[in-house]
């Protein structure tokens, strides 16, 4: 007579480990460019010339540049006192006032970097020596908030022109740009003859400056003692717009030490210092501006070891390599599980440092103990993201998700031990006709998977009753069948075969 144990399971688990900057210059001539430093990632620097709208040369004019990430920056001017104004005049480049590469090392900008030309009208009865305020303003508006943009100055300073359009050699002029927007401060990064004072004002270190970033020579005028103010200034803060008020500084440059008079020209000798610049003087200072934004990004590469497990209780060690692929230092670095299929406590990553400089990486770690349910499922999937906070911001930056899959390569196996226990039911001290045989069936899970839908079939013994229908690895149960009553034929045969 045959007997056997059957195991039915929907499926066996199988798997594998899958695991800006602003600069303004006045000219007689000057140029400003806004940029951001790029130690690791690619700074967001516009590559195409700006589009303009409105009447150029008036405060209604505007110019818009587009960054590679799609953020736009729109620059507009503003009226000052009397006839003074600062206005967009068109498209230019960072190198329009001369170019020195070391002025723009963070980020590294090119002479061809697109910029917006802005002009300040200084015909406001300004003094021949000293400061002149109320010259208007300009504003950069971003389509989305930008963190820590850098202003790249392409030439602050110029020289004064007389009514005929020729320099009078009366004085040099330098624009002074004062940040009036709340919630941000300024810090100098690099540049020749460039200074940031009070955390909010961009000016020339030596205002006796020329119109160019790369020379002290002025066209049709006396040589200056310094180049124009050129370089990079970082805006510390997360901003949606930046507004600067514009004023000017006038510095005598006549070689005799005497400020030339109102009637000066390039061929006559001048005596006597005037108290103001001549009425009608074409005192116009133009500069270029371009805003570039830092790249804010993190990457995460997640791995697991081992990539194959076979039994509950095994440990999986996870590694998370977090890299700051952006341009600014990130703080509050964390790794968080966004999806985890394991049935135990999810792994909690620990990182050696909470801060990552631009371009730096660190390896965070976590561990997990495999459960029997994980083995039964056939795999453990795990998806995580890294996060960090840029400076002057409360909004975390998240990495793209990284996923690993650990395979549970286990097998299912059942064991069956059947025993027969004769019972002398008639009490004659002999196993003979009328006595009983009691059957037991011990079913054991000898594999690594939980076995479900367990049933024992024994046609000779009849219906077999088991207390359970599933067994975890290592578990056993005893099943029973109705007792067999020994027949006369069994007694004649001398044995019962099952």
Image (tube, rainbow, N blue to C red):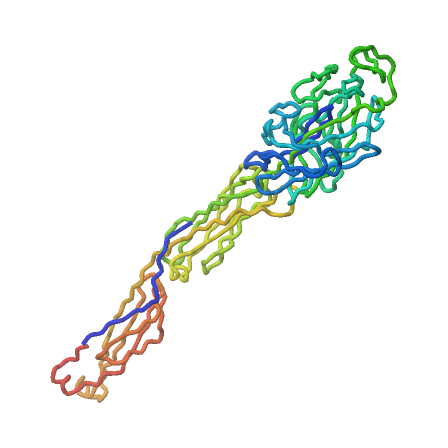
- The percent coordinates of residue 236 (x first, y second) are 68, 38
Q: Is residue 136 left or right of residue 148?
A: right
Looking at the image, residue 10 lies above or below residue 129:
below
Looking at the image, residue 398 lies above or below residue 221:
below
Q: Is residue 51 left or right of residue 370?
A: right
Q: Is residue 124 left or right of residue 327?
A: right
- The percent coordinates of residue 461 (x first, y second) are 23, 80
Q: Nearer the viewer, residue 447 or 239?
A: 239
Looking at the image, residue 38 lies above or below residue 70:
above
The quarter of the image holding the N terminus is bottom left
Q: Nearer the viewer, residue 368 or 27?
A: 27
Tell me the residue at 79%/25% (across/down).
249
Tell me the residue at 20%/74% (across/down).
2
Q: Quadrant of residue 132?
A: top right
Q: Quadrant of residue 175?
A: top right
Mark count:
0
- The percent coordinates of residue 83 (x first, y second) are 82, 32
- The percent coordinates of residue 5 (x first, y second) are 26, 71
Tell me the residue at 59%/28% (across/down).
112
The quarter of the image holding the C terminus is bottom left
Q: Quadrant of residue 458?
A: bottom left
């Amino acid at each position: 007579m045959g007997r056997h144990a059957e195991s039915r399971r929907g499926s066996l688990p199988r798997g594998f480990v899958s695991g800006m900057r602003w600069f303004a210059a006045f000219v007689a001539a000057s140029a400003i460019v806004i940029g951001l430093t790029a130690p690791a990632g690619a700074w967001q620097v516009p590559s195409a010339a700006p589009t303009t709208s409105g009447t150029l040369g008036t405060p209604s004019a505007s110019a818009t540049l587009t960054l590679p990430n799609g953020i736009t920056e729109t620059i507009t001017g503003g009226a000052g006192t009397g006839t003074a104004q600062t206005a967009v005049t068109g498209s230019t480049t960072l190198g329009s006032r001369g170019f020195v590469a070391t002025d723009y090392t963070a980020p590294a900008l090119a002479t061809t970097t697109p910029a917006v030309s802005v002009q300040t009208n200084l015909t406001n009865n300004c003094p021949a020596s000293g400061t002149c305020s109320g010259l208007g303003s300009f504003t950069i508006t971003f389509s989305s908030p930008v963190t820590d943009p850098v202003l790249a100055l392409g030439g602050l300073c110029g020289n004064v022109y007389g009514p005929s359009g020729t320099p009078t050699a009366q004085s040099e002029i330098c624009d002074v740009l004062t940040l009036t927007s709340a919630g941000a401060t300024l810090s100098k990064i690099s540049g020749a003859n460039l200074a940031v004072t009070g955390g909010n004002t961009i000016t020339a270190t030596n205002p006796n400056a020329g119109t160019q970033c790369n020379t002290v020579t002025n066209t049709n005028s006396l040589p200056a003692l310094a180049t124009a103010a050129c370089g990079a200034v970082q805006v510390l803060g997360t901003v949606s717009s930046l507004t600067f008020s514009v004023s000017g500084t006038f510095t005598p440059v006549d070689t005799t030490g005497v400020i030339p008079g109102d009637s000066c020209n390039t061929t006559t000798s001048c005596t006597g210092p005037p108290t103001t610049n001549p009425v009608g003087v074409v005192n116009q200072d133009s500069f270029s501006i371009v805003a570039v934004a830092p790249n804010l990004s993190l990457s995460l590469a997640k791995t697991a070891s081992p990539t194959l497990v076979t039994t509950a209780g095994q440990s999986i060690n996870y590694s998370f390599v977090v890299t700051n692929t952006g341009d600014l230092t990130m703080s509050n670095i964390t790794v968080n599980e966004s999806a985890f299929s394991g049935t135990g406590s999810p792994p909690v990553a620990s990182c050696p440092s909470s801060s990552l400089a631009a371009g730096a990486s660190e390896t965070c770690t976590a561990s997990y103990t495999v459960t029997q349910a994980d083995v039964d499922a056939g795999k453990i999937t795990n998806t995580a993201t890294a996060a960090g906070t840029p400076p002057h911001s409360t909004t975390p930056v998240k990495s793209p998700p990284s996923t690993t899959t650990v395979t549970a390569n286990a097998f299912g196996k059942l064991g069956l031990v059947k025993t027969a226990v004769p019972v002398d039911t008639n009490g004659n001290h002999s196993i003979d006709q009328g006595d009983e045989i009691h059957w037991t069936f011990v079913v054991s899970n000898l594999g690594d998977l939980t076995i479900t839908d367990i049933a024992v079939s024994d046609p000779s013994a009849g219906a077999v009753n088991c207390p359970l229908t599933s067994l975890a690895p290592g578990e056993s149960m005893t099943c029973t069948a109705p007792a067999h009553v020994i027949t006369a034929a069994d007694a004649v045969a001398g044995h019962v075969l099952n």
